[in-house]
Amino acid sequence: GAGVSQTPSNKVTEKGKYVELRCDPISGHTALYWYRQSLGQGPEFLIYFQGTGAADDSGLPNDRFFAVRPEGSVSTLKIQRTERGDSAVYLCASSSGQQETQYFGPGTRLLVL
Amino acid sequence: DQQVKQNSPSLSVQEGRISILNCDYTNSMFDYFLWYKKYPAEGPTFLISISSIKDKNEDGRFTVFLNKSAKHLSLHIVPSQPGDSAVYFCAAKNTGGFKTIFGAGTRLFVKA
């Protein structure tokens, strides 16, 4: 079956612009995670959804970052007023439950010029 | 504050030999540990895990060892194959929580 997909695969934007990154989880997976991976680092937790609600958003770096999952499936990570330091690979993962194995998408590589 | 540390950025091993990747953690609340493998331009893929009630878990060529008193775990790959060349991430979590904390990764090169 289909795995986790993320679009776009690459995004180049200018400082100050708004971007949206999309994640399509594995069908039926109730848990969805967003991570950010900077160069030379491991994935850094941003937010966790159980169903439609954000159960833990403590990893979001500041209020420019926001994520939604309105129907409990697709999720969108939104970044306002992008800064050069936001440049990273944004990874999405889903699982069938909080304690279950997370399956990662290929990521969206964001470059803020 | 890095709660999960992988102090070796890279490791080179001859095909057929054993690869040993190490990981240390600082948070004593962690009770579940995972290893992920990542190829370029792909997301991390789950490899093997271990609960803190065990000190060893084996799956084919992959074995993870956990030393709770030392807050140390290691991944052994034997025999190593060229297709094992990838970045390996150690990760940890508290089974009652949501967050999984990843190390910075170790890049493994298996030479044919």
Image (cartoon, coloured by chain):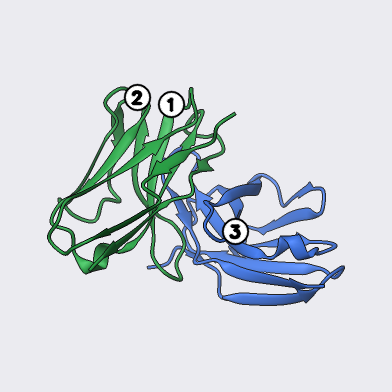
Which chain's residue wears label 3?
A: B
CB under 8 Å between callouts 2 and 1?
yes
Is A10 rendered above or below residue B53?
below
| Residue at numbered disc 3 | B39
| Residue at numbered disc 2 | A72
Q: Considering the image in quadrants, where does the C terminus of chain B appear?
A: bottom right
Drawing shade for chain B: blue
Drawing shade for chain A: green
Say if labels 2 and 1 share a chain: yes
Which chain's residue wears label 1?
A: A
Instruction: Give me the C-alpha separation between circle 1 and circle 3.
Output: 26 Å
Residue located at (57% from left, 59% from top): B90
Q: Nearer the viewer, mark 1 or mark 3?
A: 3
> In the image, A27: left or right of B35?
left
Image mark for residue A30 = 1
Residue located at (55% from left, 66% from top): B105
